[in-house]
Amino acid sequence: MNAPAIPKTLPSEEDIALARESGRALSTVLQTRSETQQIDFHDDKGAVRAVRIPTSALRLLLEVLTEIGQGNAVSIIPIHAELTTQDAADVLNVSRPFLVQLLEKGDMPFHKIGTHRRVRYQDVVAYKKRIDAERRKALDELAAQAQELGMGY
């Protein structure tokens, strides 16, 4: 499986506005308990094609629209996807050499295909969650020390 592309550009102002508008409309449709929804697509010649879509996929689409509506670039990556070291570094917002150091130290599992390292997306997410939790704990401890010392935090 090829690694998914990580978007490098942010959405335009038009895309942001359209994502907000369509997200609001979609959220009203998703207030259903039905497992599927039907959407009518209109082509440029006026033909209509009805498509049934799982409601779970439309909920994911709403999350995508919400992110775009906030000006964020979005990438959908399957949980079991294998990323290149550059793609994994992009997800973590670190340099590729720094990511390779993490891999070689054993901070995150990886395997090789020939001479190329591959990292599972779910391992990248697990690492990010672990690091974020450690950072939050350290900040909480610093804030508690500052309170004890009366530093005004």
Image (spheres, grey):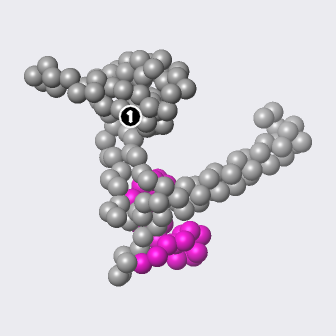
Q: Position of residue 93 (x, y in %)?
A: 46, 53
**Residue 13 screen position, x and y as percent:** 31, 25
Determine whether the residue tagged by mark 1 lies in a helix, strand or loop: strand
Quadrant assignment, res 24: top left
Say whether residue 20 is visible.
no
What residue do we see at 14% from left, 19% from top?
46
The disc labelled 1 sits on which kind of residue?
Ile
Residue 145 coordinates in the image, percent (x, y): 84, 46
Q: Which residues are magenta?
A: 85-112
Identify the residue at the far right of this view. 148
Q: Quadrant of the N terminus?
A: bottom left
Residue holding disc 1:
53
Residue 149, placed above or below residue 152: below
Q: What residue appears at the point 55 percent right and 55 percent down from the top-left corner?
A: 125
Q: Is 27 in the magenta?
A: no
| 95 lies above or below 22 | below
For image coordinates 41% across by 28% down, the residue present is: 37
* Prevailing secondary structure class for the magenta stretch in the rendered image: helix
As for residue 96 lying within the magenta part, the answer is yes
Q: Which one is in front, 78 or 134?
A: 78
Q: Which of the image's four quarters has the C terminus? A: top right
Which x, y percent locates residue 128?
A: 58, 55
**Residue 48 placement: quadrant:** top left
Q: Nearer the viewer, residue 130 or 96?
A: 130
Res. 38 visible in picture: yes
Which residue does the image show at 28% across and 23% down from the upper left? 40
Q: Is residue 52 left or right of residue 105?
A: left
Local crowd at mark 1 within 10 Å, few (<14), some, or many (≥20)? Answer: few
